[in-house]
Image (cartoon, helix red, strand yellow):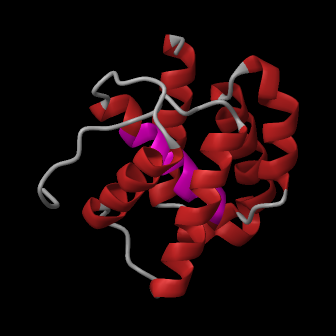
Amino acid sequence: MRPALRSAIINITDVSVDVDVRLETRSSGLRTALISAITACADQRFQKKARKFLSGLSTDELQYVAEFLGACVLESVGRSGLSRGELAEDIAQFELVRRAPAHGPSDREHKMILLLEYLCRSGLTNWSMAVRAGPT
């Protein structure tokens, strides 16, 4: 991945953590920034399809995808060509070590499914992360 894309995802992930209070007033700009940054990470052949998929997600769901991609950038183990099952395992491990408050099991599972679909549909099957044993 290009350094500029890594920076965009990391910055958007950092910004998104403390945006909850001001979300209503900045929601449109935040959504646009998240969609642009996440789309830029997709394989170039799938960017149009990725943007269309991402446009249907809520700001909260977009933040979840950006958080996962940011974690992958920071903790990448450099694997490539992961199967759908391996991606699902990485997403489940990511969810276990996340520091974000849970809104309930169904919300968490829904976001995990959306993330898996996005990764598979956008050619990002090489995104993986080294997962810690627990939150730090």
Q: Is residue 104 left or right of residue 97?
A: right
Image quadrant in which the C terminus is located: bottom left
Number of marks in picture: 0
Q: Quadrant of residue 57?
A: bottom right
Horizontal and vertical percent position of residue 90: 37, 49
Relative to 114, 72 lies left or right: left
Q: Indicate the position of residue 50 as horizontal and vertical percent values.
A: 78, 39
- The image quadrant that residue 74 belongs to is top left
* Residue 69 lies in the magenta-colored region: yes
User: Is residue 71 depicted above or below 99 in this figure?
Assistant: above
Residue 110's x, y, as percent? 59, 73
Tell whether position 45 is magenta: no
Q: Is residue 128 above or below residue 105?
A: above
Picture coordinates of residue 12, whole percent (x, y): 54, 41
Examine the rendered structure and indicate whether residue 100 appears above or below residue 31.
below
Identity of the residue drawn at 46% across and 51% down: 85
Identity of the residue drawn at 74% across and 52% down: 31
- The residue segment tinted magenta is 61-71
Identify the residue at image location x=59%, y=64%. 113
User: Which secondary structure class fits the magenta region best?
Assistant: helix
Left or right placement of residue 75 versus residue 103 in this view = left
Left or right: 110 in relation to 50: left
Residue at image point 67% right, 47% down: 118
Q: Give whichever of 15, 52 is nearer the camera.
A: 52
